Amino acid sequence: MLPMIVPSSASPVLRDDRAAGLLMGRSTYNSSQSMSEDAFEFMFRRHRRDAILLHRSYPPHCARRTNSKFGGLPRLPDGVEWPRTPNGTPLHFLLQIDCADLPFRSSLPESGVLFFFARDDESLDWDIDRPPEEACRVLHVRAAPPATPLRQPPSDIPPIGGAYRPHGGWRDTLREGENGPSFHVEWPIEPLAMDSWPSWLLEDDAAPGAGDRDAGLAPLSGKRRAPELDLDPARQRRYADALDQRRKDAFARATGMAPPDFRVDEDRQSGRTIFFHAQRGVAAYPQHWATIRYAARLVLRQLAVRPYADPGLVARLPAEAEAWLARAASHDLDTSVCEADRADFRAWLLALRLTGDDSPLSAEAARLVYLSMLATIRCWAGDAERAARIAPEAYETMAAAFSAPNIGGQVSYMLGHPPVVPQLDRPDDPAVCLLTLASEQALGWQWGDIDNCVFWVGTAALAGGDFTGVRAALEG
């Protein structure tokens, strides 16, 4: 099956005055946001902490290439064994971080590459009371330069998500009974310095009269949110609103861009924009046979999971989709679609009306265009040459789907404040939030119920460069 290897992006364009203000170090709030910010300014100053944003530039081929990346295949030297669970099951590769790419000195190693692996199966039952190597491993390899050959996974590695629960990156493009791939989509990472703040009110911040101090370097195991303290729920909500705005500003300052807003009907509007942008020529949809293959697979998947009222159309669509799959199989998937084939495929989409929609392009067809472009961009993100072949207009239209933060305002980062109170704390070795991986549409990653995957390491262990005891947990 077509490997899901991922894209990157062109220089982001600031679209409004608010974004310009963010880049100049100021924020533009409405009056209620301003009041909320002022009320918690003491806490934001007091508990600000440096974090490292794992930024996916968009579009991918415009990213500054580093030796850090999400997914794909690791540049793991031949002499380093691929990590396995105690029962011998190979772990899945998640990402690699070259310490030379880090934006500031910290408790992380100054050189070498960190490789993160985890058991990414259907259950994700990472019990914190069991040995950590049953769920994850972090390897610090001192010599793994960019020229290191890519390492293929072991032949016995299971598909990501297991045989019965493939993950979101490719779930909608799989045939009935077909396994997903054993490696995640690839996307280059540019590590950037970013401010972070606690996700909760801390005990000594329960009232605005708490004293101000420079506690940005307070230990991660310091003051805790205490649920039994009956803190004012309304105050908690106001803090959450103020924090959301503060985090958006921090993301904008770190990346030089304001994340676009994702509309409720983003899929249909974006699909129609892409379809009607160009009727003919090299920038017209579909540009490449890979997009046609994804679209045909999406139709077959949709027919398998959802009933439709028009029995005649439903009866003939599988054969038509299969015919397009066969035509796609006769071409290299990254080659351009000729004008005649493009016209045929566009006519097929225009006739696709499963729910009686009389729009120029039905809602079902528009969503198909959107999802097939989503899959194509994901597939080629890790290959700069292929990613550059996609029309700039398509990248622009799909920006909201790929520009983080896009699911619950979450981003992936290292260090900084954890998304939740540490569960793995020990008085003799307080837990450090080594890595937080967010559920996000761009990579097709979903941790639990759109949660975070958090890697924890002890403070003393991190200071000694010891990653053997790193634990992973799903955190809401």
Image (cartoon, helix red, strand yellow):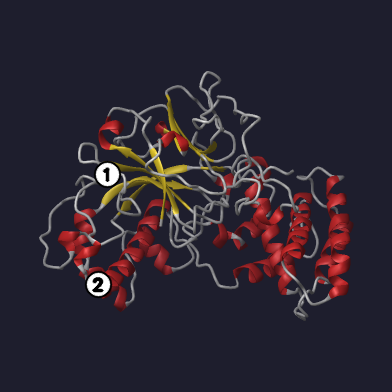
Q: Nearer the viewer, mark 2 or mark 1?
A: 1
Whole-percent x, y for residue 398 in the image: 61, 60
Image coordinates of residue 120 in percent, x first then y, are 54, 43
Identify the residue at the far top of this view.
79
- In the figure, residue 129 lies in which quadrant? top left
Q: Name the residue located 26 percent from the left edge and 69 percent from the top edge.
A: 37
Q: What is the number of callouts on the image?
A: 2
Q: Above or below — where is 369 with respect to 362?
A: above
Tell me which numbered mark, 2 or 1, is placed earlier along the sequence.
2
Q: Residues within 10 Å of mark 2 (few under 14, many from 20)?
A: some
* Left-right relation of 180 to 96: right
Q: Quadrant of the N terminus?
A: top right
**Placement of the C terminus among the 4 image quadrants:** bottom left
Q: Amino acid at mark 2?
A: Arg
Q: In which image quadrant can residue 271 be found?
A: bottom right
Within 10 Å of disc 1 (Cα), the crowding (few <14, some 14-19, many 20+) is some
- Circle 1 is placed at which residue position? 425
User: Is residue 97 at all visible to an observer of this figure?
Assistant: no
Kindly state the secondary structure of the residue where label 2 is placed: helix
**Closer to the camera in the image, 291 or 249:** 291
Label 2 to label 1: alpha-carbon separation: 27 Å
Q: Residue 228 vs residue 94: left or right?
A: left
User: Residue 268, how many percent across, how many down?
Assistant: 66, 70
Q: Nearer the viewer, residue 389 or 222?
A: 222
- The location of residue 202, given as percent across then percent down, is 21, 59
State the mark number for residue 326: none
Which residue is at 35% across, 59% downward? Answer: 247
Mark 1, secondary structure of its residue: loop
Name the residue type under label 1.
Asp
**Is residue 105 at least partly visible in the picture?**
yes
Q: Is residue 404 rendered to the left or right of residue 226? A: right
Question: What residue would you read off at disc 2?
Answer: 235
